[in-house]
Image (spheres, rainbow, N blue to C red):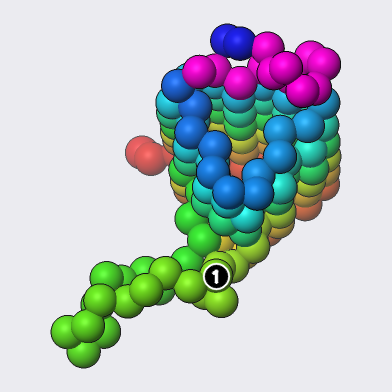
Amino acid sequence: MNRSPFIEGTMVHTSANIYGDTFIPVSTKVGAFVEITGGVTIGKRCKISSHSFLCSGVILEDEVFIGHGVMFCNDMYPKACEDGVMIDFSEDKVIPTLIKKGASIGSGCVILPGVVIGEGAMVGAGSTVVKNLADGETYYNILK
């Protein structure tokens, strides 16, 4: 990882892709092969592990942990065409997702648009989050 020349303690891996107006704040670490589109808000002292994807509308408050390979979604009804015509991406369709202070999201999770993950909540690895989680709640999917 390389230290950011702009903010003390911030580390962004050279293979991370960060687009648009996304700002990486104090002491936040962004791992290898992370993709962060424009329109993402990231708090202080967050850790975003390798191979994760944060799309526009994602808001991370301070001290959030994102495990490896976490995928965020921002459109509930995605499609490529309508009546045979390609659809242009529009920020109007973005549904914001909020991850509150100190929450942890395990590796391999998928976070659907519009959910709020509460302060200090824990999401188990491999889970798909489809509903809001309360502060301090632990949530996981187990396939039997």
Residue 129 can be seen in this image: no
Q: According to the image, label 1 marks what residue? A: 91
Which residue is at 59% across, 67% downward?
A: 95
- 71 in magenta: no
- Quadrant (top left, top right, bottom left, bottom right) of the C terminus: top left
Q: Which residues are magenta?
A: 3-14
Of 99 and 40, nearer the camera is: 40
- 7 in magenta: yes
Q: Position of residue 5 (x, y in %)?
A: 72, 17
Snapshot quadrant of residue 114 = bottom right
Which residue is at 68% across, 12% downward?
A: 3
Image position of 105 (left or right of 103): left
Toward the left, the furthest residue is: 84
Q: Position of residue 37 (x, y in %)?
A: 53, 47
Q: Position of residue 73 (x, y in %)?
A: 48, 55
44 w.r.t. 22: above or below: above
In the rendered structure, which amino acid carries the disc numbered 1?
A: Glu
Mark 1 surroundings within 10 Å by alpha-carbon count, few (fewer than 14), some (14 through 19), many (20 or more): few
Q: Secondary structure at mark 1?
A: helix
